[in-house]
Image (cartoon, rainbow, N blue to C red):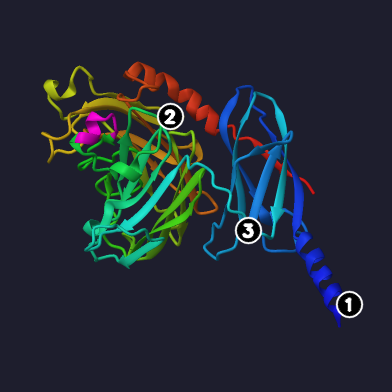
Amino acid sequence: MKKISFICLWLLSVAASAQTKTVKVTVSNEWSVDKVDEPVVVRLKEVKKVGFEVKSARVTCEGREVPCQLDDMDGDLRADEVFFLTDVKGLETKSFQVELSGEESHADEKPRVYTALQIRDKQDKHPDVLKVEAPGKSFLFNDIYMHGVTIESELTGYRIYFDHRQNIDLYGKKYRRIELPETQFYTSAEQLQQGYGVDVLWAGNAIGCGSFKDWNMKTLQPENWTDVAVRGQRVVTSGALRTVVEVYDLGVKAADGGTYDMHQYYSLYAGHRDLTVDVMLEGAGDHRFCTGVQKVGATADEETRRGHQSEGFWHADGVAASWGCDYPDMGKKQQWAPEPVGLAVYVPKEYIQGAQEDDLNYLFTVEADRSNSIRYYVSFCADKEEQGYHSAKEWFASLDAWKDGVNHPVRVKVGK
């Protein structure tokens, strides 16, 4: 019996030690420009013959460990992707070793991104939740702390309102650091004196910065998501390097009387100021939507603009941008001063059906591709940033490089 027990224990030990697999991953920058904090995704379904449930991962390059995170993208509590960031020079190819393991790891990386979906409670503790879903007619805007799901990198912060507007709101800051766990978008006067950032945009009836809206073909105006059966928000993944959140509307009533479902995914990476927005549609057909940027400070007086004239443009290549200065909260002018900001959106040409300018916005009308999806990009800067852009000229001049960068992602090849 002792020999049998020993053999069983030995077999169990061998089986446990065998629950690892190392694969070679090559990352190629086929563009001539150096890339910094470039996102790399390794999909586990592309790794052959794993044979076990992956519970941790370790990435190395030339013997040096590279921070990574393991992400469950579909909510089934099983890992789907390994994600990491890398610097890669122009026309350079780098080789990585990705070790997958069936054992859990508790490595504690300093977070470079922040994610929060919280609810208000009587104890004022604002507990974190992973998902909020409600009938479309329910008004939960004031029951969600920060009024919607919130994400942040060292450079910028965003929140998407949990209501019919689903506007993207902006948090600008002086220093490159994570701040929203302390300020929660509601920066106090004391925190402002200490150099913390603040909400920097008031959208009002405008498109804001890259908000995704319905398009009324009769009035030729953006419309909010007022007639939906179910409205929800979900934290998809919230590691130290990448955050992905979902905003969805089910049973959206179309003008022709039909209905469709819409899922929006917002991805923010450490070291980045820009969002990647993926919209997935079911049953929408050739329905049109819109996005764009508002004309910041277009309705402000000269005193409010503080010398920052409202400027902007849209180009046929899919870039729309603006620069200006206005109060970030019209109801709290005594608390928060006017904020100069630059806004930008980039929509690849294949989705664009038209472009127009009105009194408040620069807009693109868009349709989904054959896969019933739309991908576009949103970015902004705050004049208050120490390491940022401080004029319309500087901001506008940076956008071609930004557009070219997202059009030249690295090529990732997964070996055996």
> Which residue is identified by label 3?
104
- Residue that appears at 60% across and 23% down: 34
Residue 8: % across, % down = 82, 74
In the picture of the structure, the residue carrying the numbered disc 1 is 3
Q: Nearer the viewer, mark 3 or mark 2?
A: 3
Q: What is the distance, in whole Å, between disc 3 and disc 2 at their CAs?
A: 49 Å
Whether the residues at callouts 2 and 1 have beta carbons within 8 Å, the answer is no
Residue bearing mark 2: 316
Rendered residue at 39%/38% (across/down): 178
Label 2 is placed on what type of residue? Ala
Amino acid beneath label 3: Glu
Q: Residues within 10 Å of mark 3 (few under 14, many from 20)?
A: few
Q: CA distance from mark 1 to mark 3?
A: 30 Å
Where the N terminus falls, by quadrant? bottom right
Provide the residue span drawn in magenta.
Answer: 190-197
Instruction: Give residue 146's position: percent from left, percent from top.
Output: 28, 50
Residue 260 versus residue 232: which sits nearer the camera? Answer: 232
Q: Are marks 1 and 3 in contact (CB under 8 Å)?
A: no
Q: Position of residue 61 (x, y in %)?
A: 71, 36
Instruction: Kindly identify the residue that appears in the image at 51 percent across and 40 percent down.
Output: 350
Q: Residues within 10 Å of mark 1 (few under 14, many from 20)?
A: few
SS at mark 2 in the image: loop
Q: Nearer the viewer, mark 2 or mark 1?
A: 1
- Amino acid beneath label 1: Lys
Q: Depth-wise, is mark 1 or mark 3 nearer the camera?
A: 1
Q: Is residue 297 visible?
A: no
Mark on residue 43?
none
Q: Earlier in the sequence, mark 2 or mark 1?
A: 1
